[in-house]
Image (tube, rainbow, N blue to C red):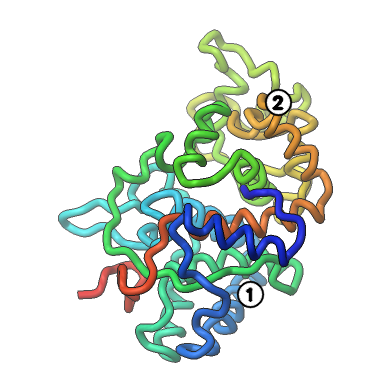
């Protein structure tokens, strides 16, 4: 979800000004060049190895990064385990279906062997999101600025779905716009980042109301493509199904591409929040622009930079966790 930045040189200038909004001015390219020169190579090697044998990981890491940044900023608070005295973000309903934590731990363990106490878990998440998606292309498809530090606070209540934190798949456009604006992100960012739904799956209970009870009168959402709705009903047979999952992009669910936007134009967005993008002229115009795959890849990278800078901890703020799931003692 990002501003319309057309060339790399221009984007550097514009991005520098935007980082101030997101508190990420101290993030920079190759932050670990001197302190841990192999850091990014180590992350990529492990992530690519794991994605090669588990094609669901890119969607998981994208979602992990998103859920981390939208709660307390990109500080790896999503990785902290609950304790006897505190239920952490992991315990919140939107995060119960997150995955890939074991791979993050594997990366952290290797980095601690190579450069103890240097690379933050927050940076690992940001790099894992980029590298996992990039495996398909065998090259990095966006630049990740690094220098984040880790937070020490993680509360379940902070991750409940509401307009000032994680947006709901049931949100209408105004709620989505406000949710992103609260993080310093634009309508353009909202639409671009929604393109992440081109990979991954959705649980029936987050969209089945569109099939069976859209307005509380046992009706279907009239904006949903009828053929697509009929297919979804074969997968989600009732409103109470909380187990079944379906691809968010039925045509190419494991391929990172711009098919999400092509599906949207066919009224085949899975969630109400997807369909909502066509209820606003600015958002719809952006959807149309992103029907060009190269525009989508370029804009997605820029929006991911902006999202990855939300309320980051840098300098002497926060800490570098020794283990990603617990704060340092």
Mark 1 = which residue?
A: 48
Where is residue 267 shown, x and y percent of the image? 75, 28
Q: Residues within 10 Å of mark 2 (few under 14, many from 20)?
A: many
The vertical placement of 236 against 212, above or below, is: below
Q: Residue pushed farthest top?
A: 217
Where is residue 68 shown, x and y percent of the image? 43, 55
Q: Residue pushed farthest right?
A: 292
Where is residue 246 shown, x and y percent of the image? 63, 41
Residue in the image at 75% along x and 22% along y = 226
Which element carries disc 1, helix, strand or loop?
helix
Q: Nearer the viewer, mark 1 or mark 2?
A: 1
* Callout count: 2
Choose between 207 and 194: the one closer to the eye. Answer: 194
The vertical placement of 284 against 40, above or below, is: above
Residue in the image at 67% along x and 71% along y = 52
**Is 237 positioned to the left or the right of 123 in the image?**
right
Q: Earlier in the sequence, mark 1 or mark 2?
A: 1
Choose between 265 and 245: the one closer to the eye. Answer: 265
**Is 260 positioned to the left or the right of 108 in the image?**
right
Residue in the image at 31% along x and 69% along y = 317
The vertical placement of 311 against 29, above or below, is: above
Choose between 267 and 202: the one closer to the eye. Answer: 267
Residue 247 visible from this viewpoint: no
Residue in the image at 58% along x and 73% along y = 47
Q: CA distance from mark 1 to mark 2?
A: 35 Å
Residue 194 visible from this viewpoint: yes
Choose between 92 and 277: the one closer to the eye. Answer: 277
Quarter of the image for the C terminus: give it: bottom left
Mark 2 = which residue?
A: 229
Give the quadrant of residue 105: bottom left
Give the quadrant of residue 151: bottom left
Which element carries disc 2, helix, strand or loop?
helix
């Amino acid at each position: 979800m990002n501003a319309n930045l057309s060339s790399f040189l221009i984007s550097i200038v514009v991005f520098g000004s935007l980082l101030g909004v997101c508190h990420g001015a101290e993030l920079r390219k190759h932050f670990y060049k001197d302190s841990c020169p192999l850091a990014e190579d180590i992350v990529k090697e492990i992530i690519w190895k794991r994605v090669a044998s588990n094609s669901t990981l890119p969607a998981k890491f994208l979602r992990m990064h998103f859920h981390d940044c939208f709660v307390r900023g990109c500080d790896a608070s999503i990785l902290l385990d609950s304790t006897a005295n505190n239920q952490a973000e992991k315990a919140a309903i939107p995060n119960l279906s997150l995955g890939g934590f074991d791979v993050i731990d594997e990366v952290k363990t290797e980095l601690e062997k190579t450069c103890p106490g240097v690379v933050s878990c927050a940076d690992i998440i940001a790099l894992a999101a980029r590298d996992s998606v990039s495996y398909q292309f065998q090259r990095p498809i966006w630049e990740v600025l690094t220098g984040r530090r880790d937070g020490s606070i993680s509360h379940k209540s902070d991750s409940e779905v509401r307009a000032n934190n994680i947006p709901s798949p049931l949100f209408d456009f105004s709620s989505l716009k406000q949710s992103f604006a609260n993080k310093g992100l634009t309508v353009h960012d909202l639409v671009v980042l929604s393109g992440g739904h081109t990979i991954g799956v959705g649980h029936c209970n987050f969209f089945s109301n569109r099939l069976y009870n859209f307005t509380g009168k046992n009706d279907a959402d009239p904006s949903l493509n009828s053929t697509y709705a009929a297919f979804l009903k074969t997968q989600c047979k009732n409103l109470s199904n909380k187990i079944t999952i379906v691809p968010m992009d039925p045509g190419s669910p494991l391929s990172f591409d711009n098919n999400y936007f092509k599906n949207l134009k066919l009224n085949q967005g899975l969630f109400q929040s997807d369909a909502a993008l066509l209820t606003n002229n600015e958002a719809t115009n952006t959807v149309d622009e992103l029907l060009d795959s190269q525009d989508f890849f370029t804009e997605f990278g820029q929006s991911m930079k902006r999202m990855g800078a939300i309320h980051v901890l840098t300098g002497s703020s926060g800490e570098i966790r020794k283990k990603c799931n617990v704060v340092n003692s």
